[in-house]
Amino acid sequence: MSTFVAPPTPTYAEATPRVKAAKVLTDAFAPGNLVIVLLLLIGWHSTNSFSGAGWGLFAAFFCGIVPMGVIHFGIRRGKLTDRHVRVRKQRIVPLTATVTSVVTGIVLLNLVGAPREVFALVISMLVGLATGLTVTVWWQISVHNAVAGGTVTILVLTFGQTLLLPAILFVAAMGWSRHALKAHTMAQLVCGTALGATAALTFALLR
């Protein structure tokens, strides 16, 4: 079992400029936010219309909005320390709830005939979640970098190689922010990114 425990992060008022910048990146590009934006973009691409974005929003409810609600509820109940769930053992319940929500979304998307790209993306998210949950039982992998890595890889696959350099820079910036906040070791960041790439491979095979 991992003994790594991320320390509490200081408030914005207490933080140094470096830590403030890291907190802004971590908060603005939190996994739930990236998931919602990615589903909207892929949804739009699937039909090149607002109807596709609507499909993306429907999927985002199960893959992003419900999981964020579960975390918020856990914080309100005192079961979770913070919105990024820095304590590894606390991650198992919200991750399990997220898997359940995503599976529900997959069933409904299949029943109502969602566009192939949207359906493939949600399946790939389930693969990433299931893998992340398995690893989390014994090790604190970086969910931030997993979602960031998967997101940018899927965007490059969908919209072309011109996004490759910005994608690499974005993942590096996310990794820097998590490391600056002492939320993860370098190994946890690298493995998280690799996990995200695995989810992206699933998307590439299914779309």
Image (spheres, rainbow, N blue to C red):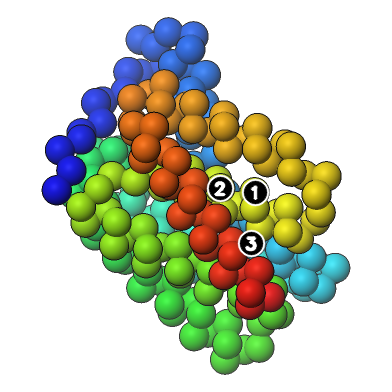
Query: Mark 1 falls on what kind of element?
Result: helix
| Labels 2 and 3 touching (C-beta < 8 A) | no
Q: Is residue 19 left or right of residue 150?
A: left
In the picture of the structure, the residue carrying the numbered disc 2 is 149
Query: Mark 2 falls on what kind of element?
Result: helix
Q: Is residue 84 left or right of residue 152?
A: left
- Decide: is 176 above or below 202: above
Which one is nearer the viewer's eye here, 207 or 91? 207
In the image, residue 4 lies at what x, y percent? 20, 35
Q: Amino acid at mark 3?
A: Leu
The residue positioned 26% from the left and 25% from the top of the image is 8
Which mark is first along the chain, 3 or 2? 3
Q: Amino acid at mark 1?
A: Val
Give the CA distance from mark 2 to mark 3. Answer: 15 Å
Mark 2, residues whose alpha carbon is within 10 Å: few (<14), some, or many (≥20)?
many
| Labels 1 and 2 touching (C-beta < 8 A) | yes
Which one is nearer the viewer's eye here, 123 or 84? 123
In this rendering, which labeled residue sits more in front, label 2 or label 3? 2
Q: Which mark is residue 39?
A: 3
Query: Mark 3 falls on what kind of element?
Result: helix
Mark 3, residues whose alpha carbon is within 10 Å: few (<14), some, or many (≥20)?
many
Q: Amino acid at mark 2?
A: Gly
